[in-house]
Image (cartoon, rainbow, N blue to C red):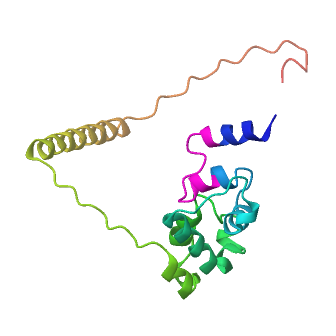
Amino acid sequence: MPRWCLALFAAALPGASAHPCDAEAATACPFDGGAALGVCLTTPSKHEVATTLSPECETFVAMHGACAAEFAGGTCGGSAYTEDAVLCLTSWMAASDVSAGCAAALPAKEEAVVQELDEATLLKRAKRKRAREKAAEEVRQLNEKNSGKAPPKKKKRKKKPPTGNMYEDL
């Protein structure tokens, strides 16, 4: 299969990559991934098609330069230049294990957005909560009622009269 077909196929995959250098990687380095993608992106002579890096991609590449030790091995080894790179550094690694230079190069954390709910939504949630609590109480009462009963008695087996054959009588 020609290389351009593979490049077109790789670019058409939905969600194949979600990092800031996704577009540049698809045109400049369609056959590279991980650390090899970083080498290709930072070396214009290795580009399949001459490509200029976007400011977001340049920031992503700079972060990888600052965090090279973290991507060399350990928890984040192998996640360099992937969609999991930032996630690994910010969530999977302890903050104490990230160097000061790398921490400074990481994107700022986004604050959680507090969503204000309208009165109808709050009433609906309260009604559902009451229904769940009522159902849980009914189950508790049913369990208490059932636990008070004695377990069913086992039926006694009637013994067969001996046949005279010692193997059948066992």
Residue at the bottom extreme?
100
- Residue 52, percent across and down? 59, 61
Tell me where the magenta segment starts and ends, as one range.
11-25
- Residue 133, percent across and down? 23, 44
- Residue 157, percent across and down? 64, 20
Which quadrant holds the C terminus? top right
Who's the residue at 67% across and 57% down the image? 50
Which quadrant holds the N terminus? top right
Q: In the image, is residue 66 part of the stretch drawn in magenta?
A: no
Residue at the front extreme?
50
Foreground of the two, 45 or 94: 45
Q: In the image, is residue 19 part of the stretch drawn in magenta?
A: yes
Who's the residue at 69% across and 53% down the image? 49
In the depicted structure, whether residue 61 falls above or below residue 17: below
Foreground of the two, 145 or 170: 145
- Residue 3, percent across and down? 78, 41
- In screen coordinates, is 41 left or right of 144? right
Look at the magenta stretch and give its main secondary structure.
Answer: loop
